[in-house]
Amino acid sequence: MILSVEDLRELAKRRVPRAIFDYADGGAYEERTLRRNGADLDALTFRQRVMIDVSNISLATNFLGAAASMPLGIGPTGLAGLFHADGEIVGARAAAACGIPFCLSTMSICSIEDVRAATKQPFWFQQYLMKDRGFNQELIDRAAAAQCSALMLTLDLQVIGERRRDPRNGLTIPPRLNLRNAVDVAMRPSWALGMLFGKRRTFGNLVGRIGGTSGIRTLAEWTATQFDASANWRDVEWVRSRWPGKLILKGVLDAEDARFGVAAGADAIVVSNHGGRQLDGAPSTISVLPEIVDAVGGRCEVLFDGGIRSGQDIAKALALGARGALIGKSFLFALAAAGEAGVTKAIEIMRNELRVTLALTGTTSVDAVGPHILRAGHTQSRPL
Ligand SMILES: Cc1cc2nc3c(=O)[nH]c(=O)nc-3n(C[C@H](O)[C@H](O)[C@H](O)COP(=O)(O)O)c2cc1C
């Protein structure tokens, strides 16, 4: 019985090989920040309110001027197409049908053009700053040609945090069958068949675009050779000057950086620590959200990610000032568990949880959510 995102996670564990599951489930180094994201959200408690008319509750909102049915979006995740055949297309379709935004990663399996051809709603496109700025320009042009409604520039991956589960599991792209994983794969026949008969198994946006991609087998290897460790705010301004549409800056965890982001022309920032996959020992996103909202002072939208597994978590992020929340792992678990139906299920579970949470805190719309729905004094990181 699937009643929660955790149920989808358990199902995902059984549906995809360990290396794929762990790639989503894990974080960097000792995974402290990964755990903190969830623990600090859990530590927040709601103020239960009673005898308020909650017979009509509105979850509708908008992101960057576009209507959304609830304050939730699917964030960019590399390799989604390895969790389920054509995973990015499937995810974009589910998001569109549920009325929420979908962001495609540069490191996706389905390319920008694949997703554009297979979907009707505009989607967001995420990119990193590459050493080869010509390639960034090319990606910007491709996103514009695909009529992407926003460009998301990720700022927190100039170098890659070591995700230790990946080398331990021997994760390669495309996945390879070897003696170590043969039994694991054989026990997951529907995944194996999906991959075997699926057209796409490697980085769709990169193949054939930069010399030598065919020899690249791991994400860490690709990142080390292509991402620009010297990138700085002037480069963000460069992207701003090249992209005429809405610009989202993702990976802000510090109030001063938030101010720089606003000055660089961001339409939105995403408070994010990459789901605990980069700087281990960094604070949880929920613990820094209030100071970042304060620093931004309404000059751009503030989105939030990190540890969102339920509608309650979304309500907590809204209470501390976010306009909406994005999901990474919850999306991938749902995708691995049951493809498009799984992603739809995850969104609907979160929608219902959010609706009930608003009702029981005496709140009738997402616009009316504020810090008053939380009990005071529970926002500090605690040692794990
Ligand atoms: C498997 C995986 C791959 C990811 N790939 C990307 C990516 O390509 N680009 C990016 O900006 N963020 C990427 N992220 C980070 C997510 O966009 C998001 O910040 C994070 O997952 C949020 O935390 P959550 O997983 O707890 O929801 C990835 C996250 C995961 C779990």
Image: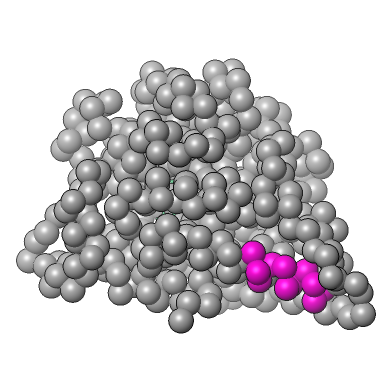
Relative to 145, does residue 214 appear above or below in the rendering? below
Q: Is residue 8 visible?
A: yes
66 to the left or right of 234? right
Compared across the picture, whether 272 is left or right of 189 comes to: right
Residue at x 80% of width, y 48% of height: 294
Q: 15 or 178, which lies in front?
A: 15
Residue 280 visible in the displayed image: no
**Is residue 236 rendered to the left or right of residue 225?**
right
Magenta stretch secondary structure, dominant: helix
Residue 29 spot, x, y in % from top left: 39, 62
Identified at 83% across, 79% down, the residue is 48
- Residue 165's x, y, as percent? 31, 64
Using the rendered view, name the quadrant where residue 45 is placed: bottom right
Q: How is the image coloured?
A: one colour
Seen from this angle, which residue lies furthest left? 179
Up the image or down, 170 lies above or below 97; here it is below
**Looking at the image, which is closer to me, 319 or 53?**
53
Relative side of 111 to 320, left or right: left
Q: Position of residue 28 (x, y in %)?
A: 41, 60
Determine the residue positioned at 9% across, 61% down: 178
Nearer to us in this view, 110 or 271: 110
Q: Quadrant of the C terminus?
A: bottom right
Q: Quadrant of residue 357?
A: bottom right
| Rendered position, 358 above or below 196 | below
Range of magenta residues: 351-361
Q: How many marks?
A: 0
> Is 168 part of what is drawn in magenta?
no
Q: Residue at x 62, y 54 (%)?
A: 72
Give how far across and how far down residue 320 sits, in percent.
76, 59
